[in-house]
Image (cartoon, rainbow, N blue to C red):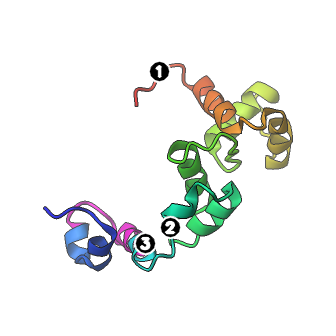
């Protein structure tokens, strides 16, 4: 099996990728991501220097990558310490539980409450997630 590299994935047969269990939509997303790398529209060398907002703007140019996916990438791959994924349902549930007696909170209110967590909002988010499921996760 050849190494999975953007240049190979970008031009790989769609049906062969579908045979791996991917939907047509996911194949299109993967091939668009590969195309962005092949065309050097994603510049990994600059990622460490880019702000979170710059990274999100760059990543969301790829089909299938939205703000939430970009934020998860920043938290778990880039290890950025101050990302607050306001669209994350787990964060919303935990914030409602711990800050509003289980009643829903607006994203504006969640953002306001989380300001005190700066510059460690990624870490605080992780603790919010963990508060919903006390069983340790092995990575």
69 or 49, nearer to the observer: 49
Q: Which mark is residue 37?
A: 3
Q: Residues within 10 Å of mark 1 (few under 14, many from 20)?
A: few
Q: Is residue 81 left or right of residue 136?
A: right
76 or 50, nearer to the observer: 50
Q: Residues within 10 Å of mark 2 (few under 14, many from 20)?
A: some
- The mark lying in front, picked from 3 and 1, is 3
Q: Residues within 10 Å of mark 3 (few under 14, many from 20)?
A: some
- 54 falls in the magenta region: no
Q: Residue at x 58, y 44 (%)?
A: 75
Looking at the picture, does residue 80 appear above or below residue 1?
Answer: above
Quadrant in which residue 83 is drawn: top right
Q: Secondary structure at mark 1?
A: loop
Q: Are the residues tagged 3 and 2 within 8 Å (C-beta)?
A: no
- 29 falls in the magenta region: yes
Mark 1, residue position: 136
Residues in magenta? Answer: 18-32
Dot 3 or dot 1: first in sequence order is: 3
Instruction: Return the x and y of residue 16 as percentages of the image width and height.
Output: 19, 71
Mark 2, residue position: 64
Q: Quadrant of the N terminus?
A: bottom left
Instruction: Return the x and y of residue 7 as percentages of the image width and height.
Output: 30, 74
Looking at the picture, does residue 12 appear above or below residue 87?
Answer: below
Q: Quadrant of the C terminus?
A: top left
* Marks 1 and 2, how far apart at CA: 30 Å
Q: Are the residues tagged 1 and 2 within 8 Å (C-beta)?
A: no
Is residue 101 among what the camera can see?
no
Quadrant in which residue 12 is drawn: bottom left
């Amino acid at each position: 099996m050849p190494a999975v590299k953007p240049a190979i994935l970008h031009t790989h047969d769609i049906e062969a990728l579908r045979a791996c269990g991917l939907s047509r939509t996911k194949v299109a997303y993967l091939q668009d991501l590969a195309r962005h790398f092949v065309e050097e529209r994603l510049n990994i060398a600059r990622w460490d220097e880019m702000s979170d907002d710059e990274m999100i703007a760059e990543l969301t140019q790829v089909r299938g990558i939205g703000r939430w996916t970009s934020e998860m990438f920043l938290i778990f791959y880039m290890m950025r310490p101050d990302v607050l994924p306001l669209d994350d349902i787990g964060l919303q549930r935990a914030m409602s539980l711990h800050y509003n007696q289980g009643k829903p909170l607006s994203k504006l209110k969640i953002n306001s409450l989380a300001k005190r967590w700066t510059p460690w909002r990624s870490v605080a988010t992780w603790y919010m997630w963990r508060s919903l499921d006390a069983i340790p996760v092995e990575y």
